Image (cartoon, helix red, strand yellow):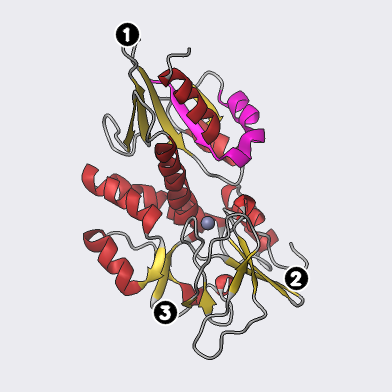
Amino acid sequence: MDGAGLVRDALEDLCREHLVPQVALDRHWPWARVRAEQEERRLFEVMRRLEPEEYRQARALLAECPAGPLRVLRKRWDRLWMRFDFFESVSDWPWCQLEGWWYPCPKCRWPMRVVETGQEVEVRCEAHRARGVHYRLSLERGGRGVAPVLVGTGRASEPVVGFPASVDHLALSRPVWRYGVLPTLLEIELRDRLKDQAHVRVEMWPGELRPDEYDLRITVAVPGRPVRTWRVDAKDWASAAALAKALLEREPKPYTLFIVVPDHQAHEVAYLKARLTGRRTKVLTLTRLVEQIKRAARGVQ
Ligand SMILES: [Zn+2]
C-alpha cells in the first residue's frame, strides 16, 4: 500500500496474476482475481473466433484505440465493435480521474493513474512510468470546463490533454489492457525497430495454422546463407513467476518459440529461462532480440 492506503499499481497486477486469497484483500481491493482471469480468457476466446483478417485488425486496434470518446471508438472499431465488448466507462474508474477529467498515456493511450499525496498530484502510466511517462499538476489553473494542465516530469512525458471522465468516454478493461494492449505495443515496437534492416522480413500475427498461434514471424534471408526464422510471442506481465506458470501450462510448440519481454525485465530473463528449459522456448528482452536479428542480417553468426 502507498502512504494514502491505496494499493500500489504493481501490487494490483501481481495479485491478479497470482491466486491471492480474496478475503485477504477484500477490504482494500474490491476486484476479484477470478474476474481478471475470466476476462483474459474471454479476450482470447473472442480473438480466436475472428477470421484471420479481423484478428489482425483487432490486434492493431488494441494498440491504436484502447480508450476515448464512444463515437470515435465505435467508428474506428467499426464492424468489430459489437463483438468486442471489453470497454468500460471511464466515469466508473475513480483512480484515473482528476477533477472530472482523465488523461491518456502518450505511449499506450490508456487512462493514466492519478495519485494524490498531500498537496502533490502525480499522473502517471502504470506500465510506462519506468520509461519516463509521469506528470504533475500545473499550478496554473485551467478554469471552468477546461481540463487541469499537466506538466511533464519524465523523459517521455509528451504533452497530454485531458478528456471529460463522462459516461461516454470508454476504455478497454484492465485485463485486456495488460494482456492485449501492452504485448501488442511491444510487437509493434519490435517491428518498427527492424523496419529498415536489409534482408529482414517481419510478419505480424502470421500464424501458420491460426493467426493467434504466435505473434510475429521474422525471417532473415542473407544471399548465400541459409534462411533463419524467429517465431516470437511478446509478453508484458507484472510477474515473471506467473508468466512462467502460464507458459508451462501451454502445449510445447513443434518449433522454437522466442518469448520477448520488455527491456526493464532484463533481470528476470535468467529465471524465465531456467523455468522453461526443455520446452523449446527462448526468452530475451526486446533489445537483445533486435541485436540478435541485426547481427544475423549482417551475416554474423
Ligand atoms: Zn502507458
Give the amino acid at mark 2: Ala
Q: Which residue is mark 3?
A: 167
Q: Residue at x 35, y 9 (%)?
A: 225
- Gap between marks 2 and 3, in whole Å? 27 Å
Is 191 situated above or below 134? above
Q: Which residue is mark 1?
A: 224
Q: Residue at x 61, y 43 (%)?
A: 239
Q: Which residues are magenta?
A: 254-276
SS for tag 2? loop
Depth order, front residue of 235/251: 235
Q: Which residue is mark 2?
A: 4
Task: Tell me if residue 157 is in the magenta stretch.
Answer: no
Q: Is residue 49 left or right of residue 181?
A: left
- Gap between marks 2 and 1, in whole Å? 63 Å
Q: Quadrant of residue 211?
A: top left
Earlier sequence position, callout 2 versus callout 1: 2
- Gap between marks 3 and 1, in whole Å? 60 Å
